[in-house]
Image (cartoon, rainbow, N blue to C red):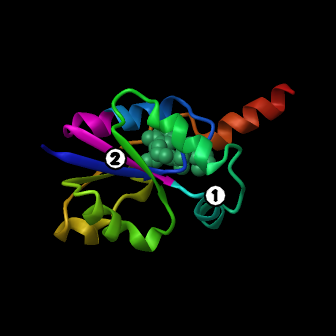
């Protein structure tokens, strides 16, 4: 069985999230998703997620094709998570291209292109403009 792992905040779910999860799953047989904790998300993006880490985890767990979810507490622990969850493939969006190549000693590292024209940030901005 080929196990895939990917990571992200997955706040205010949108089609880009669904597509990367589907494409990640298509690379193997089992998909584990590390969901950024509220604190890690703030450290990465300098803004609070709309949905709590527990809600984001529950939402992503309910997506067809996602087999397992856990909370990612620190970017520094990625190597540990890869080993803990027995991942054969690490999938990241190409906004991170090259930044995880040092994990090639642990597993295959694949960067998938992001879906054009959508992000959580742009969705929230869109909602604000309509309010
Ligand atoms: N992603 C994607 N296509 C998009 C947006 C996100 O493939 N249009 C991927 C990212 O590359 C990442 C995962 O979805 O692998 C989770 O990204 P996340 O940071 O949660 O979503 P964003 O929409 O980029 O969030 P934000 O606008 O807050 O940065």
- For residue 94, side relative to residue 57 (left or right): left
Q: Residues within 10 Å of mark 2 (few under 14, many from 20)?
A: many
Q: Which residues are magenta?
A: 23-35
- For residue 21, side relative to residue 60 (left or right): left
Residue 78's label in the rendered image is: none
Q: Is 24 one of the magenta-colored residues?
A: yes
**Image coords of residue 123 (percent x, y):** 67, 34
Q: Considering only vertical position in the picture, is 48 above or below 65?
A: below
Q: Is residue 72 visible?
A: yes
- Give the position of the C terminus as an image quadrant: top right
Front residue (pair 56, 16): 56
Residue 38's label in the rendered image is: 1
Residue plotted at (71% across, 44% down): 50
**Image coords of residue 81 (percent x, y):** 34, 63
Residue plotted at (36% across, 43% down): 68
Disc 2: which residue: 32
Q: Considering only vertical position in the picture, is 41 above or below 23?
A: below
Q: Considering only vertical position in the picture, is 59 above or below 79?
A: above
Front residue (pair 9, 85): 85
**Image coords of residue 36 (percent x, y):** 53, 56
């Amino acid at each position: 069985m080929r196990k895939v792992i990917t990571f992200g905040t997955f706040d205010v779910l949108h089609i880009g999230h669904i597509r990367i999860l589907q494409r990640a799953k298509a690379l193997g047989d089992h998909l584990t998703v590390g969901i950024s904790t509220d604190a890690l998300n703030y450290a990465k993006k300098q803004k609070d997620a709309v949905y709590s880490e527990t809600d984001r985890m529950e939402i992503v767990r309910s997506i067809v094709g996602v087999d397992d979810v856990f909370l990612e507490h620190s970017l520094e622990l990625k190597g540990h998570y890869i080993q803990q969850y027995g991942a054969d493939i690490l999938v990241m969006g190409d906004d991170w291209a090259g930044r995880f190549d040092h994990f090639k000693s642990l597993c295959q590292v694949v960067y998938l292109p992001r879906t054009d024209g959508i992000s959580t940030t742009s969705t929230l901005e869109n909602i604000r403009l309509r309010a």
